[in-house]
Amino acid sequence: MNLQAPITDGNRALKMYARRLEKLGIIKFEDFLFHFPTRYDDYSLISKISDVQPGEVVTVQGKITDIKNQYVRSTRLKNIQKAVIEDETGKLELTWFNQSFLVKNLPIGADVSISGKVELSKKGKSIKSPKYEVLYNNQTSPLHTGRLIPIYPETKGVSSKWLRRQIHNIIKETLDEIQEYLPGDLIKKYNFPDIKQAIKNTHFPTNLTDAKIAKKRLAFDELLLMQLAANVRRDKWNKQKKGTPFEIQKFDNEIKKLINSLPFTLTASQDKAIEEILKDLSRNKPMNRLLQGDVGSGKTVVSAIAMFVSFLNGYQSVLMAPTEILAEQHFKTISNLLKPLGVKVGIATGSNKRKGASKKGEEKKLNASDLMFKPDILVGTHAVLHESIKFDKLKLVIIDEQQRFGVAQRGVIREKGENPHLLTMTATPIPRTVALTMYGDLDLSYLSEMPKGRQIVKTWLVPPIKREKAYEWIKKQIKETKSQAFIICPFIDESESMQTVRAANIEFERLKNEVYPELKLGLLHGKQKAKEKSKILEEFKKGKYEILVATPVVEVGIDIQNATIIMIETAERFGLAQLHQLRGRVGRGEKQSYCLLFTDNDFAQNSKRLKGMETLYSGAELAELDLRLRGPGNMYGTTQHGIPKLKAANFSDTQLLQIVKSEADRLFDKLSNYPKLLEKTKQITLQEVSPD
Ligand code: ADP
Ligand code: MG
């Protein structure tokens, strides 16, 4: 078996399951081995039937001597399976619910192994809903009973039991092929098991200590490879051809003038970030810096200053953003700021390009390649990647919300210039320790404070019984404070979603006709044409609507000062990162702002995750909360937010992170001495950190 082959090369069951397994990150056979259990059920106590005690979790082995379906009326239960297992010491009753197929799977006479908790009833000892498996003639040991049973992350239609069988078979067939890649002295130093042992013992340990040690080694590996990959990228960056140093001092006055012309004073961390960026730009090595700052911390103006410096030096810059709405907004912001200083600003977005193709007059505006118009700064969506867009002297590339772009896209845009400086920006609050591992190749700047005078957005979780009251309250607020509100629904139409989810277009009609007949409502969603979207936003900005019903297309970017209320429907469907982004759409002006999280789900009312939104206001704190509640794998949403899912390791294990960092730095210089480790590292380097 080739561990690197896609599982679709396998048998029919695997082909059928491929789609579902992909959700678990299992694409090639090897991925099964790295699909680690989250816990183990301990069924290792194998007991004779006469010895079992009520309350014990045991495994018994014997023959099925009776099994039948009993049908039950009038309750939710449809049927019960009653069976009897016997060994040479006695009998035990077994009961299952709604699994009528068991009568076929565990026929009378079958040798079986059964695990579960023993109960005492009037009729004697029994086990309810036990785990079971048939023991065939040649079977030496049970797989799903009678041992520590690994419980795996599952997905719809893929059970732990099924995964356990697959993983067991693959380990059996391939364990010999798996080759050690960690240097021997490291294994010795940390008392690690070798890779074969580690894999076997995380899945099928004989005791929990072995499992723990195995997991520790695999966590170490995972972080080490990530760190080494970052080191490789850094090295590659450092070795590339020279960049272009910008003159900074010469333009001191111009830069100061721009900063003084801003309608606000920069925060201390903005000042610091600008200083760090300008220093990078003055070097002959291309900058490779990540600017991280919470929603609303003011990253755009920092990037604008860098682009202005590029302009002063006679070079072009490009600013790429993930959505059209955002690109248009940046275009306006940058134009307002820099046009008065003689900077030519252009925009390229998908719809602009299309428009340009049909209407001659428009071409200028959008198509940077049209030699008539050469902007000093081009703002755009991924449309700027298009081959028709060429630059003469692109020396600065800025990527906003960088996690929304793939590695390849980031590469393409840089290719349009000659070793341009690169500034990437993100609002994802990656804890510093995590950033050092994942982005160890980048220099980091943090905007650690919000601009002065920003108010916190008061946030409430609204239970179903308070829904009507909340609607009233929103209306009163709108009327009394003359402000506006967003109402966010998770989807555009009902077909895309489950019934319980409120879909924007249906909700829009309902709100307009039944809840707020006396208010003006607009509707914004992702399926509208870009032109229509900007028209609606523009109208909302001008106050034509009091309420904008929208899908999460408003998640990134949009800056509407007079909107002070955001109400989010079915809030439990959103990750904390997304909720935080959405909440960032309000609280941008002087008025007190509010965020109301609606849920129709009783369980969600008590969710610690959603409750966290009521008390935590910074992305970093929310990230920590997500880390604690959902575990590192799910930290703060998904890979969509630029943080890879870890399989064995845990980003909150700062001690391990530190150890790994120093080992990686030590190993890096002699990586060529360890070809297997080098090869593994390369595999990681090639992987996309962040798919779209
Ligand atoms: P983000 O970091 O989320 O991209 P933006 O750059 O969009 O944030 O800035 C959010 C808002 O804050 C904008 O309206 C911007 O003009 C304003 N802003 C930026 N810096 C400051 C500052 N130092 N003081 C006051 N307002 C600021
Ligand atoms: Mg931004």
Image (cartoon, grey):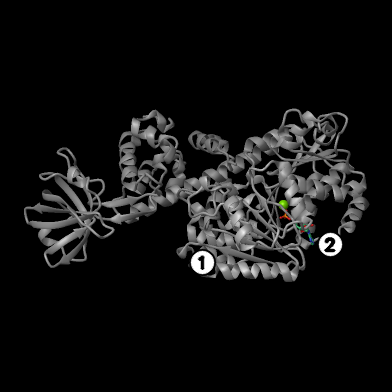
Using the image as rendered, state which of residue 534 and residue 421 is in the foreground: 534
> Do the residues under discs 2 and 1 have CB atoms within 8 angstroms?
no
Using the image as rendered, state which of residue 39 and residue 86 is in the foreground: 86
Compared across the picture, whether 389 is left or right of 686 comes to right
Q: Is mark 1 within 8 Å of ligand 1?
A: no
Q: Is mark 2 within 8 Å of ligand 1?
A: yes
Q: Position of residue 292 (x, y in %)?
A: 68, 53
Name the residue carrying label 2. Answer: 264
Name the residue carrying label 1. Answer: 464
Q: Residue at x 41, y 31 (%)?
A: 8
Q: Position of residue 118 (x, y in %)?
A: 19, 62
Q: Residue at x 32, y 44 (%)?
A: 164
Tag 2: residue type? Phe
Examine the rendering and report whether any part of residue 441 can be seen. no
Compared across the picture, whether 147 is left or right of 407 comes to left
Compared across the picture, whether 583 is left or right of 209 comes to right
Q: Position of residue 140 (x, y in %)?
A: 19, 42
Secondary structure at numbered mark 2: loop
Tag 1: residue type? Pro
**Residues packed near mark 1 inside 10 Å, few (<14), some (14 to 19) or many (20 plus):** some
Secondary structure at numbered mark 1: helix
Mark earlier in primary sequence (2, 1): 2
Residue 152 in the image: above or below residue 233: below
Alpha carbon distance from label 2 to label 1? 42 Å
Quadrant containing the C terminus is top right
Outermost left residue: 88
Examine the rendering and report whether any part of residue 141 can be seen. yes
